Image: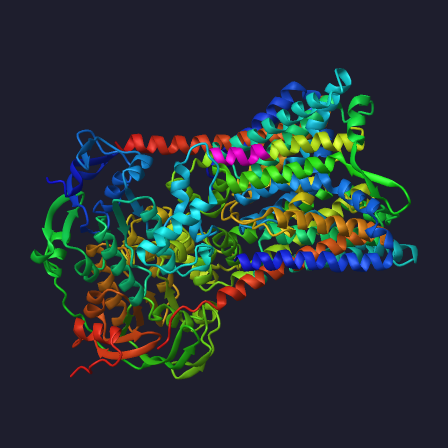
Amino acid sequence: MKKILKNREMGLVILMIAISVIITLKNGVFLRPDNILNILKGNVILALVSLGMLVVMITGGIDTSIGGMIAATTMLVGNFMVAFTGNVVIAFSLGILTGTLLGIMNGLLIAFVKIPPIVATLGLNSIINGVMLYITKGSYINNIPKEFINFGKITLFKFIPDGKGGVIGVPIQIFFLIAAIILTYVIIKYTKVGRGVFALGGNKISAERLGFNVNKITIFAYGYMGFICGIAAILHTSIMKQVDPNAFNGFDMKVIAAVILGGVNVMGGEGSITGTLLGVGLFAIINNGLTLMGISSNWQKIILGTIMVFSICFVVIQRKRASKHIVKVEIE
Amino acid sequence: MKKTSKERTLIVVFIVIFLVLTFLSPDKFLTVKNIRSMAFQFPEFGIFALAMMVTILTGGINLSLVTTATMGGVISALIMVKLYQNGVNETLTIIIAILTAMVISTLCGLLNGYVIAYIGAAAMMATLGTATLFEGVGLYISKGNSISGLPTAFYWFGNGTVFGIPVPMIIFIIVAVVTYILLERTPWGQSVYMIGCNKKATMYSGINVNKVVLGVYMYSGFLGSLAMIIMMSRYNSARVDYGSSYLMQTVATAVLGGTAISGGYGKVIGVVIAVAIMQSISTGLNIFGLDRSLTNVITGCILVGVLTLNFITGNFNLKIKKLLKQ
Amino acid sequence: MGDSTFIKLANVSKTFPGVKALDNINLEVKKGEVHALVGENGAGKSTLIKILSGNYQPDEGAEIMIEGIKYKSLTPIEAIRKGIIVIYQDFSLFPNLTVAENISISNQLEIKGKPINWNEIKKTSIQALDELGINLNPYDILETLSTAKQQLVAIARALACKAKLIIMDEPTSTLSKGEVELLYKIIRNLQAKGIAILFISHKLEELFEVSSIFTVIRDGQYIGTYPKEQMNNEKLISLMVGRKVEFIHQGATLIGDTILEVKNLSKEGNFKDISFQLHEGEILAITGLVGAGRTEVIQAICGIAPADSGEIFIQGEKVKIRSMEDAVKYKIGYIPENRLTEGLALTKSVEDNIVLTVLKQLRGKNLLISSKKKRQLAKDWIAKLNIKPANYNMLAQKLSGGNQQRIVIAKWLAMNPKILIIDEPTNGIDVGAKSEIHNLLRNLSSKGLGIIMVSSELTEVLSISDTILVMRRGKINGILEGKSAIQEMIMNAAILNKPNEPN
């Protein structure tokens, strides 16, 4: 099984390299540092949220409420900042608190009321989205305090040549992503609840029998997703310098697509951070590259959809082939 | 038609909501005009909900439902406009266009069904991929624009009436009845339920599970095209992002209507009532001048509420049984 | 009670609403002892296991003494800490995790507040595997291993948990002969370490092979504890059942023409050169050790896993069966081994399950299914096969094992089969209900049906088959006549390379 995963990840890498080569041939700008940083900055939110989705999907569940959670958090924090202060630390704290609480609500519905994840998160999404739109009437927030906007503009390591003769730095949001990657890695590899996520996704009954607190693990997974969404909300606002309540419609499908591309098993129990990041990477490269090649964004969806369908079929067919070769009886 | 407690709860909820709305605003809610306007709006959603329900029954899901329909719609609208502009007979144009939409959406369903049944990919993943693909095709063909200039006679599908009953409503009723008959009164339909309950046992009983599942996704795609035809007629144009908010709502509605998300259980009548509940709430809020966004809140609450209620009564029933046994 | 006793149960009862599952059970297991727990299905064995593992709490007045200390009841964590580890039939393992993780996972759960230590995991697992003398790669992912190897991992985990009592529930149901031998070796190894084993199995031959002492329970009651020397098959069965069960051979009344012939059926990695004939009115048993390829052969005949080469003839005509649908076309019915996961839709009614093979025939004049016809058909079969309770609306999961099996049989009888293929017809069904199913099968064959029965239970095979095919390692190693065969002949053909021919 590990071999298949490794194969898949290698396959993604090869695909990414191949596509990059094709794009670069057409338009050398692709590999220019400032473009690469562009790609990174443009997909940092997708990558971040995908990490949270990975954890949820390993438990065998799914979260279709991320659009609502992020939008609601941006609204809440945005309004707060306009009314009170653009202090970054307070903004983050508020965002994280909001996101985590919303995520925990999902977890409670799923763990205790035993509502299937897709349904619980759908319902919660409706409620959160509805409440948020009702309170804010869907209006944009354009007057974010300067303090916060300046934070969003920060870049570090300002010595990377941008290929145009100047120097640029790495946007600060990327570092948050890196921190999230490290945090997620540590959690799923080195904590009880992290391994519990895999155990739960692998065999729920065994997990219960062995004394894993399945409810706690479930609430943690969805709470973590909410936590990540909270951070994503703040970072997004810092990038866009405004709050748009409709920015995240349909975002959940994008995230799920990226995570699935990265090799997560919808049934649960399998998935890796590397794979997820590769999936996001592939998404990102296709989007950016095709634009650089002058191919309309309409083609991007077609190409992406085709890649998804093929990669899913590929993995399934490989699995079937592997199981056919299992020798059942040692013939005399 | 057997009615179990789930459906009874739903009917009660619907009646309660209906009565509350009537009571709160008798002169606006329970009028012919209002009922009629509801009857024009909800069929397209209702057909989508049924299309989603059949796939959920097999233990799968059809995330490409809406984009399949819109892609077929966009292509069919283009053909319709081209033919109409070139002076082809209006009726013929419309017939060709409708058939095009149906064929395209059904073929999309064929692709879905093939990948899910014959290749064996998980429904959620497969339909997510095809949804992206079809959306891309639709966007490419329509260049993201609205396609308008549809023949005037086409107006009838979404806005006409027959004996006072809106045409969309008639289409929906026919769809609901046909779906009911297919599911509950044909061998194919019974297989659908059994597959959702235990695919292996059904296969071991000699039923060609792959063929049945293929049919389910084709039927789902086909129904989607019907919904799209109604939408195109009502909006007098076709656009890829029509109905985009419907996708998740149809899942919620199907579940509200008593369909088990893992498959094997679900009744047409339940889904129909759930659609009626959703529509009543939406209209009611409109009448009271309340923001549309509250619809989402209330439907979300009802969904979670009804499921919680099911859970509690499920536990309650078990406890009563244990008490009675003593 | 000396200090050689690990655990002693006294006055253990368990009452559920309306049912007394256990009544005053006594059980004493000594360190290093292999103790067989014997009883029919429903006798209370699983309830007892759950009390030992802490998943159930016994009624008031129970005494559980572990290494001299008395307890009234246990929680799951306490039981594990005291060294009571259960290896369930499904192993309770995680298919997506590595061998090492599976072995060490319970230990990791015990550690509070510290991060997961992967070095520890590696060390613990390698140590456990070494102690058992098992050669497995700790980094392999569990689901890539065969069932037998997975079981070894489960045992290794028990060892890593510092088990003092390992409860094995039907450990050999999925093992081949070689794997069973390895299990015996490991059990002896564990014994030598002073670990006690509570062994539950329906395979009496195995119980006699490994255990030194038997405790019998029947209908929740403690019947007695007996050392092996005082015990034999007959005595054991009569204690389990409470009555003397005699096995009289029931043969066919009339055997007719050949309805099925199989020639040189082969499938790589499954079986080779299988040839035999089945006649009307005949019950043909295919037996042999688990892993001999019996299920694979019948699944090839049913089209579920078609053979690579060879021919199948139905009533003289050569046929191609590539799917269960084809098999049904040729009037072959298949009753699988696992009726819960493969034979029934548990959350559907008895009625829905019975009519599944004949849906097209339920259609009325308007081509739609007539619920009247459906109900009538279901009621007819419920009556004919004596399915209890006689409620067509009841969910299949609520009936007992024997009745559930009847539903599956009814489902096939409804389509008027000519050939019925059954895999382990009385698996998990208690002795009383077993003989009823046997009578049923004999009845059916007397009406002209040809029946192929795969079975691991020799008494079953000997009592109702007309012909016995013994398979060994994917090939037919012996063909015996039902009425003259005896156990030894079957075992010889199942085990030995060149069996002695029966005279």
Q: Which residue lies furthest to the left in this view?
A: C230
Residue C55 appears anywhere in the view: no
Residue A92 appears anywhere in the view: yes
> What kind of secondary structure does the magenta stretch mostly adopt?
helix
Placement of the C terminus of chain A among the 4 image quadrants: bottom left
- Residue C333: image location, x then y, percent: 38, 67
Compared with A193, A329 (above or below) is below
Is residue A145 left or right of B58 when viewed as pictured?
right
Q: How many labels does the image show?
A: 0
Compare residues C340 and C418 and report the one nearer the observer: C340
- Residue C191: say if magenta: no
Is residue B79 left or right of C79 when viewed as pictured?
right
Compared with A41, A278 (above or below) is below
Q: Which residue lies furthest to the top in this view?
A: A84
Q: Residue furthest front?
A: A159
Is residue A59 left or right of B146 when viewed as pictured?
left
- Residue C135: image location, x then y, percent: 37, 60
- Residue B318: image location, x then y, percent: 37, 34
Compare residues B103 and C120 and report the one nearer the observer: C120
Is residue C198 left or right of A217 when viewed as pictured?
left
Task: Name the image colouring.
Answer: rainbow
Residue at 16 percent across and 70 percent down: it is C249
Residue at 67 percent across and 26 percent down: it is A95
Report the span colored magenta: A216-224
- Residue A166: image location, x then y, percent: 89, 41
